[in-house]
Image (cartoon, rainbow, N blue to C red):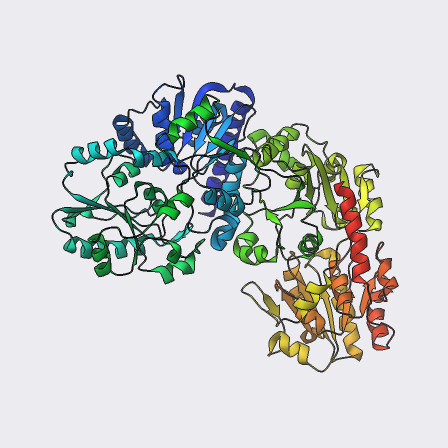
Amino acid sequence: MSLLKGLKKSIKKWKKQYYNSYIYYSYYHSKIDEKAVYVQSRGGDDLTGNMLRMVEELSTGKYGDYKIYLFAKKGTVAKIKELEKNYNLKIHKITTSKITATKYLECAKYILTDGGIMNRYVKREGQIFVDTWHGTPLKVMGVENVPEEHHIANVQHPFMCSDYLIYPNDYMKEKMLKAYMIDKIYPGKILLEGYPRNSVFFDKKRKEELKSKFNISDKEIFVYMPTYRGVFYERKDQEQKDIVAEYLREIDESLTDNQILYAKLHPNNHKKINFKKFKHIKAFPKGYETYDILNMANCLITDYSSVFFDYANTKEKIIIFNYDEEEYLKDRELYFPLSELPFPKVQTVEDLIREMNSPKNYDDSEFLEKYCTYDRANSTEYLCKHIFNGEKVCKEEEIQNDKKNILIYGGSMKNNGITSALLNLLQNVDTEKHNFFLSFRPWEEYVKKNHEEIYKSIPEGIQIFPLRTRLKPTYSEKKLLNELKDYDKKIEYPEKLKRLFKRELQRYYYNAPFDMVIDFDGYGLEQTLLFSYYKQKSAIWVHSNMVREMELRGNQSETALKEAYSNHDIIGVVSPALIEPTSKISGRKDNIKVVHNFNNADKIKSDAEKDIFIDKDTLINTNNPEGIEGVLNSKGKKFITIGRFSLEKGHERLLCAFDEFCDDYPDTQLIIIGGMGGYYPKTKRIRKVLKHWKNVTLVKAIPNPMPILKRCDLFILSSFYEGWPVVIMESATLELPVVSTIIPGLEWIENSNGYLVENSKEGILQGMYDYMEGKVKPMQIDSDKYNEIAKNEFYSILE
């Protein structure tokens, strides 16, 4: 079975690479078809709303003979065929194949979408991309929607590709640009124009024609359109369907023969209601655009759906049926409370029926002015004239920004020294002077599990701009990448990989106005190379002696590092001692600058005052029955080290030295805290064979180690080599005595009252004895003076 699974996995990977090869061959070799329009509605799940109305307008032929290519999932094709007939749509091709769709997408002159787009899409020069989105938001969006904040790249990518973003009111423009953090860098044009789908609400003739067609001209018509429950990736479809079905049963019994209620669940709710058991309630007629049916209504019943913003154009009655508001708001916040809406709100069927049978008795003039500002009868025509004919008939705006935009890439954002250094940097940058954007890999399991904590740790004023997906290499590019990742193999840098990384930069950041990108992580091979080809100024940070990393850990490709270091305009090393080994790799020193890590003393002290917090990922290996508190409350001295469970941290020799030390001081405790690293299992095994193993506590993946660090007596840095260990700054801030092995570049430790010992087990052991003899004093550091130096170094590279 495992062999079969492995084979299936390999075939799946091969298919993806073949897919990429096919698409990107087309991308490089096919001409853009000036008469092709690619359309994607709701990710291929529908042809509705703004997209249908744009296709309908283009089908008139008033703008030229365009070929419309539509991507639709297999289950949607029959519905689209009906729409084609009912709206006289002239669709050149409907494809259910993502491969074929992406080929059309890459070659079309015009691209229309109401939200998403294929993540393999690489925008090309000359293409015109239009994103209408799909509704004025009541529910918080993007980074403001905490459960889904880490998915914002799925929306940022198509937004940043867009030449035109369309908004029917200024409120929506402001909320959407801010929620997806593009309000400072969106490179295209904003069209303040009515939504194409809302034009129908000004068409009274169409309303009467459809009512006559459905033989309901003499009926009072209601429409019920609730939004989905839960969050997008964890919806409560079945639960909501069951509740709504029961409410509809009660409503059905209260309606008269002169009344009809059309009901429709949100498109994201994939469960179906059985309408056959109702007398007065019907499903929306098939083959017609949703708002055509809504336009027939005398009254809309909804809840937290954005549909009421659109329907308000009719000036008919709207009822908010918020029966579960308290429960709903546990999953999703709103931009403003429902109490601010002029519409009546009801929570029971009895009150709902009463409102349905009462005339409209509220003033919605202010609401219409604010939220229906640009809606009008001919919005679709004006948009098509503006976009396809180049006639400036819509209100057009552009983002105004006179600051430099700096993108900083932080890798996986794991709880380690590099992430701590990055957050310290972001805490100290001047967001009044420059706009700073933080990028990382949102698909990492760590990010998915800990996104709330990660996002909370990002200082206010820093924009979020994650990568959308992993690299999309072709078959031959993937083969070359694999050869490069064989760290034992010495090869020349494959020139063909430049094609991959330059294409990926265009896919991620087409036309994004970043004045500089900084690869602060500096470790991941793919992203290290990716950012080295950025068209504007670029820099990469070096946090450690990468020559020793390759010798001791074998975790880097010298070929890749040399290519990256040579291409970047600046290599920022965190210690003067890293200049020599870094230049040994790159073959140059002219682009190397020392940029020290910041020390966030206030946060360190604040974190140290918090209670010890152990989360679901924390592992504590101790013999004390009272856990870490028992260890800290024991009578002996407490020694501590903090650093990933990795070979270069020297934990094995620290443990051996400590074991000897305990022969003379048997009450002493040693705590080793590590956030990551593959040596945790081995460290546990080493601990177990020690004579004094009960005196050793191992802690893995604790969110905040500062409360433990503060309560210890001595910090020991046992590393073979380091760059600029943040944990030393943390220990110094908390005024702990520090013993460190002699490592090039760490001489400053001694100047700050730290204690340096020989870089060996014997040296570490001697440091312990010297501490007990009173020779090791608490460290002292002037954080303000130090940070001023670090700040000047950092800003010097941005000029």
Between residue 140 and residue 667, name the one nearer to us: 140
Question: How far across and how far down the image is residue 720, in percent?
Answer: 79, 57
Specify whether 535 is left or right of 281: right
Judge whether 751 appears above or below 693 on screen.
Answer: above
- With 291 as the anchor, is 221 left or right in this view? left
Q: Nearer the viewer, residue 796 or 566?
A: 796
Using the image, determine if residue 587 lies above or below residue 233.
above
In the rendered image, residue 229, in percent from the top left (x then y), is placed at 36, 54
Residue 238, percent from left and from top:
30, 54
When asked about the image quadrant of residue 29, the answer is top right
- Residue at the bottom extreme of this rendering: 635
Q: Is residue 36 above or below residue 547?
A: above
Looking at the image, which is closer to me, 582 or 294?
Answer: 294
In the rendered structure, the answer to whether residue 673 lies left or right of residue 11 reads right
Number of callouts in the render? 0
- Give the answer, above or below, for where 109 lies relative to 658: above
Q: Residue at x 68, y 57 (%)?
A: 420
Please indicate, yes or no, whether residue 351 appears anywhere in the rendered image: yes
Q: Is residue 280 left or right of residue 429?
A: left
Question: Where is residue 52 shown, x and y percent of the image?
Answer: 35, 31
